[in-house]
Amino acid sequence: MESQLRPVYGFLLSLLTAFLWGVLPVALTLCLKVMDSPTITFYRFLTAGLVVFFILKIRRSLPVAASLTRNGWLLAALATVMLVTNYVTNVMGLNYLSASSAQVLMQIAPFVLMTGGVLLYKESFTKVQFAGAGLLILGLGLFFNQRLPQIFASETESIAGLFIIAGSAVAWAIYALAQKPLLRTLSARQLTLIMYAAGGLLLIPLSTPTELMSMDGLQMAALVFCCLNTLVAYGAFTEAMRVWYASKVSAVLAVQPVFTFISMTLAEKIMPDTFHQPELDTVAYGGALLVVTGSMMAALGKKKPVKVLSGSLSGKP
């Protein structure tokens, strides 16, 4: 029997996710002063995984191996690897690119997700989506028309950051595509537990947990925020995908760069020696607005959205 969609709840969860992902670079910038990206990600996965484990343990709803078929476990493995890749490269990119620029570039992720839906799940590609994709590409061109010379001339930014963040966006889209069919047989929490646990194990040989001892009080607080952000944001995102149309969730997430611009501007005013927000002209701001608008149009342009069946996502596989 078809479950009732919960649009208001789904919208609020999506907006919460966009806000948390948008302000996250502020905390990550503080952590990166003494800790590398794999180690930050390891602590984020470890904390979130332990919390989700105890929640499921108390509710007696821990996932069992029989819940997934062989192909299901392969999909779960793919989703985990892509999620780890997204986390690590997204943090790593902040070493080479400003947070605001990184978030604008990350808006190619919904476009890649949409393209994957067309290729893998035979979803339609409408005129509105074409227009949205065109606006996104135009917006990126306008935005980086000013930013590229700044990046080349900068001592703190590098063109490598563009490739790292673009790779992070593609990894996120693959993760989202892989998790979609898994939500038919696993709850949102069960799926996130599997990915946090497996991802944490993958990160052990790549991380240096002892870097925690080098942190001061503010950096430690920033790491705690990053860990809580991981738990709440991805839990909210997965739950939003379960109770609302995936296309509309993606559209709300497109406002994420707005939260990043605001939070980084405030952070620069409070700690100008730590945070730097590159100056943008009117054309660059217009380009950023086109990127957000195009991303929203591409997400909302579907003729037939994904529906929720029996408490999990089901589309046109």
Image (spheres, rainbow, N blue to C red):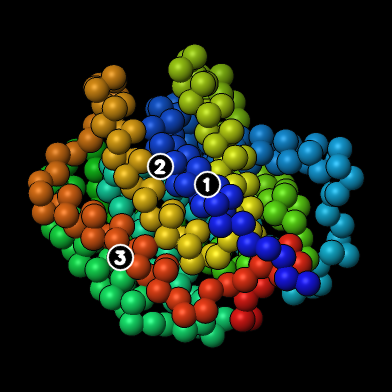
Chain-order first, disc 1 or disc 3:
1
Whichever of callouts 3 and 2 sits on the residue coming sooner in the sequence is: 2
Q: Is residue 299 left or right of residue 57?
A: left
Seen from the viewer's position, the closer of residues 252 and 279 is: 252
Between label 2 and label 1, give the one nearer the viewer. 1
Identify residue type, mark 2.
Gly
Q: Which mark is residue 294?
A: 3
Q: Is residue 237 visible?
A: no
Q: Quadrant of the N terminus?
A: bottom right
Picture layout, residue 130 above or below residue 96 = below
The residue lying toward the viewer, choosing from 120 and 301, is 301
Q: Quick one: SS at disc 3?
A: helix
Image location of residue 68, percent across then percent down: 81, 67
Give SS at disc 1.
helix
Q: Residue at x 24, y 22 (%)?
A: 269
Q: For the image shown, how many numbered marks are present on the structure?
A: 3
Query: Which one is nearer the viewer's eye here, 154 or 297?
Result: 297
Residue 34 — which label? none
Residue at horizontal 36 percent and vertical 76 percent from the top? 129
Q: Which residue is mark 1?
A: 12
Q: Secondary structure at mark 2?
A: helix
Q: Neighbour class for label 2 at 10 Å: few (<14), some, many (≥20)? A: many
Place residue 153 in its image quadrant.
top left
Q: Amino acid at mark 3?
A: Gly
Of badges 3 and 2, the one in the foreground is: 3
How far across and how far down the image is residue 219, in percent? 47, 21
| Badge 2 vs badge 1, beta-carbon distance below 8 Å | no
Q: Is residue 103 above or below residue 30?
A: below
Q: Which mark is residue 22?
A: 2
- Nearer the camera: disc 1 or disc 3: 1
Q: Position of residue 221 (x, y in %)?
A: 51, 21
In space, the residues marked 2 and 1 are separated at their CA atoms by 15 Å
